[in-house]
Image (cartoon, rainbow, N blue to C red):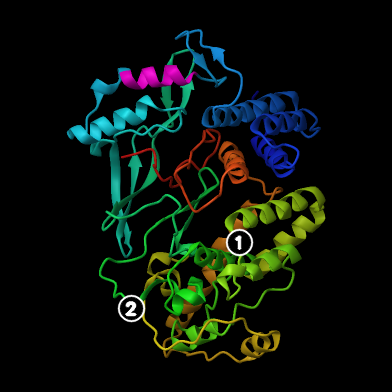
């Protein structure tokens, strides 16, 4: 299987997921069968590539069967107990972890007991809560500090568990890799069930090039503990107008923030990046002014974005609707877009972003949340088309610094973010060539959860899948949510 083209395989797997019609494939078994048949009929794959792709689908199917407790059980040849997974046995994984209890300790009985209880209920070999001794972390370096946390990077020696080896009857680890460590404070009252984010902006959206997955960070928190009660905390362009006006944050407030993220992705710019975060900008947001939608934005995407930033929170769609519409847009893209147009889109995006060097965003004022305090604001409303046009027709008031180097630095800081978004945006496209494995199991599970439950900003079900061991980018950051 040495001639396998992994980028071709993962492109095909992306295509099978994007083509799923959840009105027809309305359970995990139908989804798996549809994807398998689609792979078998794919003429772009060799027989070896089809076999590899189907094994990836089985991994996703195993996980979904176990998580949803659905499917035909088999009797494990090793432990003689019933199990749902095909590539591993849930009972064997739990027995392996139990036998290893004596080989680790946090030196705190409560923590040890909690971790042991979690391990005895482990259902997925790649989702194991474990204690990571401090000496298993190397090259710990301070990165930055937020309103309620400190961020460090480190090398996790050995890494997390990645899969079950049926021949050796043991869990295998990923290997050394970089991770992000986070120290939290003032979190005693945090409740992430049915959570509201309260500070959703692109600085809190993490993208892992290692597994091509997205993570929402700082979920469920609302800023420093010493924040004045009459103030708000966040990144101003992403804060909903009703919250700016003094009302409580809701799920609809997060939906407004999603609209700003959608605009940021479509424009390759930060919202209102040419304006100071002051009373002038606030009054315009309250009065319905929104970023100017760039030409070429798909109509469905544009309409969804406008619904999400409506001044009336009750008129904004819920997260289920957003996921469904984005899914429709994605399926349409995978089905209809010709390769020539795909390349043209890439070229257009490249021209928008320009060739800019990378910037350290941890110090950027446009990328950081802070405390704001505004008084005597009117009730939020939507602006008319004429008001929008008048606002965006105004000339910008640029301040030219005395030092040309300072001007160049400022210019790069405002535009390099767009270049970063471009790279991420292009990775979302089906025809992008990369050889990192994508997290198909997680995406299918989340699609199923969307159909079965009310989706919310809840990362409790966040699962990692196997990583691509043929990639050259295994030194990228990964968040070790399997435990510390």
Majority SS type along the magenta span: helix
Tell me the residue at 45%/80% (across/down).
Answer: 245
- Tell me, yes or no, whether the highlighted magenta stretch contains residue 84: no
* Dot 2 alpha-carbon crowd within 10 angstroms: few under 14, some 14 to 19, many 20 or more: few
Q: Quadrant of the N terminus?
A: top right
Query: Which residue is tagged 2?
Result: 230
* Residue 340 image offset from top left, x and y in percent: 81, 55
Q: Locate residue 349: give its quadrant.
A: bottom right
Asked if residue 283 lies left or right of residue 233, the reply is right
Asked if residue 151 lies left or right of residue 392, the reply is left
Q: Nearer the viewer, residue 190 or 156?
A: 190
Tell me the residue at 27%/54% (across/down).
Answer: 188
* Residue 365 image offset from top left, x and y in percent: 41, 74
Asked if residue 225 lies left or right of residue 422, the reply is left
Determine whether the residue tagged by mark 2 lies in a helix, strand or loop.
loop
Q: Is residue 360 visible?
A: no
Q: Locate residue 84: give its quadrant.
A: top right
Q: Which residues are magenta?
A: 89-98
For this orientation, the residue located farthest to the front is 314
Query: Against 164, is 16 above or below?
Result: below
- Tell me, yes or no, whether the highlighted magenta stretch contains residue 93: yes
Query: Which residue is tagged 1?
Result: 422
Tell me the residue at 59%/59% (across/down).
Answer: 318
Query: Against 437, is 265 above or below?
Result: below
* Dot 1 alpha-carbon crowd within 10 angstroms: few under 14, some 14 to 19, many 20 or more: many
Badges 1 and 2: C-beta atoms under 8 Å apart?
A: no
Q: Quadrant of the C terminus?
A: top left
Determine whether the residue tagged by mark 1 lies in a helix, strand or loop.
helix
Among numbered discs 1 and 2, the one appearing first in the sequence:
2
Disc 1 versus disc 2: nearer the observer = 2
């Amino acid at each position: 299987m040495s001639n396998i083209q992994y980028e071709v395989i993962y492109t095909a797997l992306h295509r099978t997921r994007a083509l799923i019609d959840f009105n027809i494939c309305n359970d995990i078994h139908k989804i798996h069968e549809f994807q398998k048949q689609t792979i078998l009929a794919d003429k772009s794959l060799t027989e070896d590539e089809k076999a590899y792709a189907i094994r990836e689908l089985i991994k996703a199917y195993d996980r979904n069967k176990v998580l949803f407790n659905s499917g035909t059980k088999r009797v494990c040849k090793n432990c003689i107990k019933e199990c749902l997974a095909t590539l591993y046995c849930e009972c064997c994984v739990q027995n392996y972890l139990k036998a290893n209890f004596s080989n680790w300790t946090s030196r705190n009985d409560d923590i040890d007991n909690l971790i042991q209880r979690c391990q005895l209920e482990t259902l997925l070999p790649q989702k194991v809560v474990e204690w990571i001794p401090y000496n298993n972390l190397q090259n710990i370096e301070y990165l930055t500090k937020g309103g309620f946390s400190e961020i460090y990077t480190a090398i996790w020696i050995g890494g997390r568990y990645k899969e079950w080896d049926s021949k050796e009857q043991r869990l295998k680890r990923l290997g050394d890799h970089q991770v992000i460590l986070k120290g939290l404070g003032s979190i005693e009252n945090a409740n992430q069930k049915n959570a509201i984010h309260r500070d959703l902006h692109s600085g809190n959206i993490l993208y892992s090039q290692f597994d091509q997955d997205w993570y929402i960070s700082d979920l469920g928190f609302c800023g420093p503990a010493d924040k004045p009660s009459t103030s708000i905390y966040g990144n101003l362009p992403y804060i909903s107008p009703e919250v700016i006006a003094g009302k409580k944050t809701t799920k609809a407030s997060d939906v407004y923030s999603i609209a700003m993220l959608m605009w940021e992705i479509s424009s390759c710019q930060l919202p209102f990046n040419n304006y100071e975060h002051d009373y002038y900008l606030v009054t315009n947001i309250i009065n319905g002014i929104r970023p100017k939608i760039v030409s070429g934005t798909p109509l469905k995407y544009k309409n969804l974005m406008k619904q999400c930033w409506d001044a009336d929170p009750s008129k904004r769609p819920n997260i289920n609707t957003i996921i469904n519409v984005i899914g429709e847009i994605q399926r349409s893209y995978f089905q209809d877009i010709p390769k020539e147009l795909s390349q043209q889109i890439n070229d257009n995006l490249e021209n928008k972003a320009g060739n800019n060097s990378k910037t350290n965003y941890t110090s950027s004022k446009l990328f950081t949340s802070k405390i704001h305090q505004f008084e005597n604001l009117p009730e939020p409303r939507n602006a008319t088309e004429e008001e929008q046009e008048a606002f965006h027709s105004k000339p910008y008031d640029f301040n030219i610094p005395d030092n040309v180097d300072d001007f160049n630095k400022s210019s790069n800081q405002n535009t390099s973010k767009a270049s970063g978004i471009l790279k991420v945006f292009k990775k979302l496209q089906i025809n992008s060539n990369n050889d990192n494995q994508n997290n198909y199991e997680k995406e299918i599970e989340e699609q199923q959860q969307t159909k079965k439950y009310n989706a919310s900003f809840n990362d409790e079900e966040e699962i990692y899948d196997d990583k691509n061991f043929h990639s050259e980018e295994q030194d990228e950051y990964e968040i070790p949510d399997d435990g510390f």
